[in-house]
Image (cartoon, grey):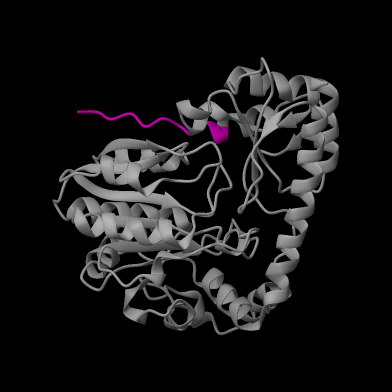
Amino acid sequence: MDTEYETPLFFHVMEYAGNADTDVIDMVSGNPDWEPPAALREGLHEYADGDPDQFQYPPSEGLLELREEIAERRGVATEQVVITNGAGEANYLAMARALERDRGIEIILTEPVYPYYPGKTTMLGGTTNFVETAADGQLDPDDVCAAASDETAAIVVNSPNNPTGAVYPRETIRELVAIAEENDAILVSDEVYDHFDLAGRFASALGFDSDHRIVTNAFSKSLAITGFRVGYAIFPPELVENAKSRHMLVNVAGSRPSQYAVLHALRETGPDYYEQNRDLLRERVETFTDALDAAGAEYTTPQGAFYVMARFDGYPGTLENVERLIDETGVAGMPGEAFGDSRGEWLRFALVSPRVEEAAERLARYFE
């Protein structure tokens, strides 16, 4: 039986904005506009000047030194770490391993949801079960517990969250791990925005020892290198070998120069780099939400990540309205309907543009 996969709306909106006749401020995707750390470029230069034998395949599961560096930072065994083609592949491997355990075919997802999660579920032959979050994006573990059953293969969560900006507190993560254990399921904790915790409350699922959780992450956002495609997944010991095999069959291996440069950047970059980026985002959040206040909009104030969701009276978050906004204001955001029915009245804007203030002014004038 043929299966059709829907192309995510991100690509449609970006294409529409790119073809516009007017100047458009891109607030669609989470591509950081700030510089990567200086050590990242140094690592690339060092690699380029190296011996040609280092231009060949790396180990399939990733450069040993990079895996060791990650393992030491995250407090796990090196053998549990698999370097992936970004967080996208890390989540794919994690969800695949959960379904391969034959403990059910259902994946519990939050609503609103990052659209790639349901897409991966469909691709892997699973079924989706959505649990709605609160207005501020917080997830009630009791709701997850009520939704979980013998058919639950995995619970997939993302904190700090895209698109709501919510950061789940430690108690929520602890309870989610316990729910996964009680239902013999896997908690997949996507922590790709961990360095963008603006509220100081981020808690990693790695803080709880369990064979029922897989943690995924990447350096795409934290080092401002979405094009390098270096991510990782941390598996329980009994699940890691099959994940490595699937990774090898799909990719053979990841990019050796990217991994080399990331390793150099991790070793040579101090905490100030990350704090400066958080400070920048805090300023942008304030600038953007002040303008939304002026426009009389309802909005979410992110505790983490770099997205703001806004609702303008009488202007639902449809693809048609997003295209209209591009044409009439030159501001490109994402339709809330892309993230599920619960945010169909909303629009989502990524604060990763140096023109955030200008975009905010354009929106304020348009909706005043």
Image coordinates of residue 356 in percent, x first then y, are 79, 43
Towards the viewer: 40 or 184: 184
Q: Point out the image quarter for the C terminus.
A: top right
Image coordinates of residue 158 in percent, x first then y, are 46, 51
Towards the viewer: 324 or 339: 339
Residue 195 vertical position relative to residue 28 in the rendered view, above or below: below
Residue 29 vertical position relative to residue 219 in the rendered view, above or below: above
Left or right, 49 with respect to 276, comes to: left
Image coordinates of residue 114 in percent, x first then y, are 47, 41
Residue shown at 46%/38% (left/top)?
115
Residue 17 vertical position relative to residue 235 in the rendered view, above or below: above
Left or right, 66 with respect to 183, comes to: right
Residue shown at 38%/76% (left/top)?
59
Residue shown at 27%/52% (left/top)?
96
Q: Quarter of the image holding residue 122?
A: top left
Left or right, 332 with respect to 259, comes to: right
Q: Is residue 336 magenta?
A: no
User: Would you say the magenta stretch is mainly helix, strand or loop?
Assistant: loop
Image coordinates of residue 319 in percent, x first then y, are 58, 22
Q: Residue furthest top?
A: 314
Left or right, 263 with respect to 178, comes to: right
Magenta residues span: 1-11
Q: Is residue 9 magenta?
A: yes
Residue 218 visible in the shown view? yes
